[in-house]
Image: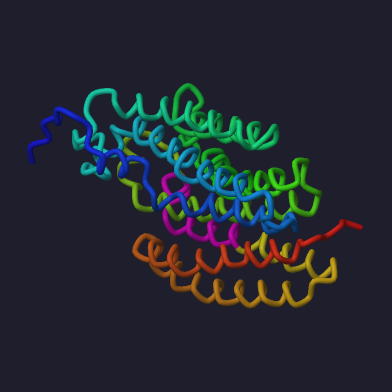
Amino acid sequence: MDHAAPRRLEFAACLELLKPITWFAPMWAFSCGVVSSGLGGNGRWTLIVAGLLLTGPLVCGTSQAINDWYDRHVDAINEPNRPIPSGRIPGKWGFYIAIGWTLLSLLVATLLGTWGFLATVLGLALAWAYSAPPLRLKQNGWWGNTACAACYEGLPWITGAAVMSAMAPDAAVVLMAALYSIGAHGIMTLNDFKSVEGDSRMGIGSLPVKLGVNRAAQVACGVMAAPQVVVVGLLLAWGRPWYAGAIAVLLAVQLVLMQRLLADPRGKAPWYNGTGTTLYVMGMLITAFALRPVVLP
């Protein structure tokens, strides 16, 4: 195939670089933060829209551009048709887009007040640390997936709650966001199954490379399930039995689906992301409604 560099950037290639399909998770988590704050949208719609734009197309899009630039050699093995290794984004334009999107994210973050701006700075710092040397956290599946899960789930959730109230969210919100971030570590592990060959050849220590595919799948399932058990227990302790019951049902279905996943981790990982992970994020929203409001004893 001829991958001659085009004379100008193509919009479609730039959009593909930013991976719109990945924007959903942080936007959903931000929405959970908005819901868990217990505050309505009156007078706050500008903040909500700006927050959704920031967490999805901007910060998440930035992280995808950074990752594609520093992973271009790995993608040449795993996904040679990606915009950078295919030549559809030529030269150093992938890096320039990552820098530009970082600056644009910081600009938009100024609309969200102190808490929103600081959260954006932290999210962008983690995005660069995840992919770029010298830290390149993704070299270690434990650290890299932790950073990624925090950016996709916990940080946007806490940001949504903080932006709505213009103050630090209460401990219950932070605790639940942290628990769902821990569970998301397992989701990140499932996403690594598709790139085992390239990761192994390029020295990237994802959990499927470190532990083997089967063992990594078992760890991922355990990491996804355990925090949800804690969530159910906490909601029961806080007098939210109906919410706890709903999450328990979702978890029970996930456990059934996990058995099929474990029988063929690499083949079923995309299927599980469309089924089990969907149930996982539904539980996040149910939990957000349960937190309106909760005061820890």
At x 24% / y 37%, what residue is drawn? 76
Q: Name the spot of residue 257 as percent of width and height, x first.
A: 49, 73
Q: Nearer the viewer, residue 150 or 122?
A: 122
Q: Quadrant where the C terminus lies? A: bottom right
Residue 97 lies within the magenta run: no
The N terminus appears in which quarter of the rendering? Answer: top left
Which residue is rendered at x = 66% and y = 53% of the image?
33
Examine the structure image and report whether residue 216 is included in the region drawn in magenta.
yes
Which residue, as the protein is rendered here, is positioned at the far left?
2
Residue 54 image point, x, y percent: 52, 41
Residue 165: % across, % down: 75, 46
Q: Is residue 112 above or below residue 189?
A: above
Quadrant hosting residue 142: top right
Q: Which residues are magenta?
A: 207-224
Tell me where residue 210 appears, x and y as whole percent.
Answer: 46, 44
Residue at position x 71%, y 58% in the image: 40
